[in-house]
Structure formats: C-alpha cells, structure tokens
Image: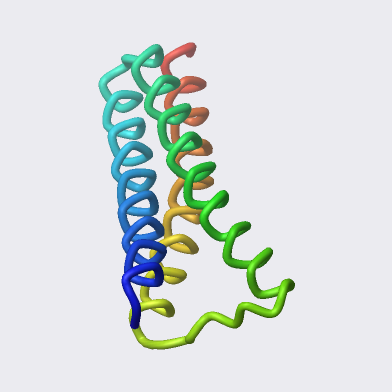
C-alpha cells in the first residue's frame, strides 16, 4: 500500500470514528435533556460524514478514470468504519428525537 492509499484509508477511519463519536455524544446529551448540544453533535457527525464521503467520491472518481485502487484488508476495514458510522448516525438521530418527545411530555 502506497502513501496515498494510506492517507485515504486513515481519512476514512478517522472521519468515520469521529462521526460515530459525535453521534454517541449527541445521544448522551439528549439523554441529559441538553437538546441544543445534541443537535450540535449531530451536525458535527454530519460534517465528519461529509468529509468521509468526499474521500470516497475521490476514490470513485479515480477508479472511473482508470486509476484502480488496491483493495486490501485495511481498505475493507475503513469502509466498514464508514458504514458503521452511517448506521450509528441514523440511529442517533432517531434516539435524540425520541428523547426530545419524552422530555416534552
């Protein structure tokens, strides 16, 4: 794996991990009734996901232009981080909404 691929993999892992972490913090804030922080954390998670998406888009563009990326265990692991972060972010949004409804009762 060359240096460029390592940067791509690390960008995906870091942004995916940061997105998941921010989403988890949003759930904790909502559980404590701090919905302003929860909303900010969800926005932060979305920003990290956007950065990861930009990395993926770059990979797809390069692939479409004939620059084939080596698929190895680290790349699979990085993509797994992104998929988990997406799922966790979606779930966090639902949980924040649920806590918001419970607090309004």
Q: In the rendered view, would you say 31 is above or below 7?
A: above
Numbered disc total? 0
Q: Is residue 36 above or below residue 2?
A: above
Q: Residue at x 48, y 86 (%)?
A: 70
Figure check: 62 above or below 2: above
Which residue does the image show at 34% across and 78% down from the upper left? Answer: 2
Pick the residue in front: 38 or 4: 4
In the picture, residue 40 is in which quadrant? top left
Depth order, front residue of 62/31: 62
Residue at (27, 32) in percent of width and height: 28
In the shown orientation, is residue 31 left or right of residue 98?
Answer: left
At a point 52% along the width and 38% down the height, the residue shown is 94
Q: At which x and y percent is residue 54?
A: 56, 49
- Estimate the x, y position of residue 6 in percent, counting from the top left: 33, 70
Q: Nearer the viewer, residue 96 or 52?
A: 52
In front here: 67 or 94? 67
Q: Is residue 49 left or right of residue 15?
A: right
Q: Give residue 1's position: percent from left, percent from top.
A: 34, 83
**What color scheme is it?**
rainbow
Left or right of residue 12, residue 68 in this image = right
Q: Can you give x and y, in whole percent of width and height, for residue 50 in the image?
A: 54, 42
């Amino acid at each position: 794996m060359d240096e460029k691929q390592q940067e791509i993999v690390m960008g995906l892992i870091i942004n995916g991990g940061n997105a998941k972490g921010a989403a988890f913090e949003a759930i904790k804030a909502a559980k404590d009734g701090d919905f302003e922080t929860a909303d900010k954390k969800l926005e932060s998670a979305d920003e990290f996901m956007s950065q990861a998406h930009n990395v993926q888009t770059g990979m797809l563009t390069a692939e479409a232009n004939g620059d084939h990326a080596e698929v190895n265990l680290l790349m699979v692991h990085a993509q797994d981080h992104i998929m988990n972060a997406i799922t966790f972010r979606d779930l966090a949004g639902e949980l924040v909404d649920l806590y918001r409804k419970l607090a309004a009762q």
